[in-house]
Image: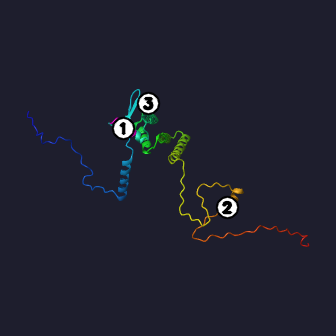
Amino acid sequence: MLLEVTDLETRDLSPAKKPDPDAGKEKYEPTEREKTALDRYRVEEATAPAAPRMKVTNGKKAATIAPDHPDRPLAGTLLKEALGTVSVDFMNGLLTQLANAGSHGRQIDEDALNFMLSVVTGSKPKDQLEAMLVAQMAAIHTATMTFARRLEDVEALNKLARTYAMQMEALKRYRTGGEQKVTVQHVSVNEGGQAIVGNVNQAAGGPAAEKAITTTPALTDARQQAMPIIETTPAQVVPLRTKKTDGG
């Protein structure tokens, strides 16, 4: 039997490459709007929190969660910075709570955990209170979508949706300190007039209304002549005419 020996040095032993379906096509050129969106995305990506993802290992008796990062101390620092805290206890406690909120029995859902963690870090909490409130919002949202998918309890779904809206309002009030800003622009007041800026509580009718009418001048346009005040005379009592007084 003859054995043919091939030249292994010149033979291509690599697997056959599939043809590129895009070969020969012109490279797509983004539109100006798409370029603007890409530039905005790069800026937001550069300023986004650098918190690592969490890796879940579900064991027979227990599950463990750990940062998916080669440097554990650095990963912990990045997580604390993204959660608005310097406390390792707070970080571990909040991560455990998020893991429990996204778990199914004893099995922790890694995707659900990382989703809720991204909600918290994406909101860029300034302190632990904001981090806890946003974590609750992430859990409420997850439960809301679960009920929306199952459609088992419409009343519970409505309650969760209202709770989320209330939490959003609470977060806004906390971040602004409960203050409301009033901006007044282009207000012209004639000489002797007064402008009132703020909340004015006035009951309809009564002495308070009369006082406001007689003491608060109306705002007028400075470019126009002020309207004159029409003087009124006190009403006079006119006797009622009867047949007797008319000679009837």
Q: Name the residue under label 2.
A: 215
Residue 53 visible: no
Q: Can residue 208 be seen here? A: yes
Number of marks: 3
Between 238 and 24, which is closer to the camera in this rendering?
Answer: 238
For marks 3 and 1 on the same chain, the one whose residue lies earlier in the sequence: 1
Which residue is disc 1 drawn over? 75
Q: Say which of marks 2 and 3 sits in front.
A: 2
Residue type indicated by callout 1 = Ala
Amino acid type of the residue that numbered disc 3 sits on in the rendered structure: Arg
Answer above or below: position of 31 versus 222.
above
Q: Residue at (39%, 44%) from the top-left corner? A: 49
Q: Are marks 1 and 2 in contact (CB under 8 Å)?
A: no
Q: Which residue lies furthest to the top in this view?
A: 61
What residue did someone put label 3 on? 106
Tag 3 or tag 2, which sits nearer the N-term? 3
Spatial separation of the CA atoms under disc 3 and disc 1: 26 Å
Within the image, what quadrant is residue 213 found in? bottom right
Of marks 1 and 2, which one's residue comes earlier in the chain?
A: 1
Task: Say if the magenta span includes residue 77.
Answer: yes
User: Of discs 3 and 1, which sits in the foreground?
Assistant: 1
Give the residues in magenta. Answer: 71-79
Image point (54%, 50%), residue name: 179
Residue type at the position of mark 2: Thr
Residue 170: percent from left, percent from top: 53, 45
Q: How far apart are marks 1 and 2 (CA)?
A: 66 Å
Magenta span dominant secondary structure? helix
Local secondary structure at mark 2: helix
Judged from the image, the secondary structure of the residue bearing numbered disc 1 is helix
Graded by Cα atoms within 10 Å as few (under 14), some (14 to 19) or many (20 or more), the crowding at tag 3 reads few
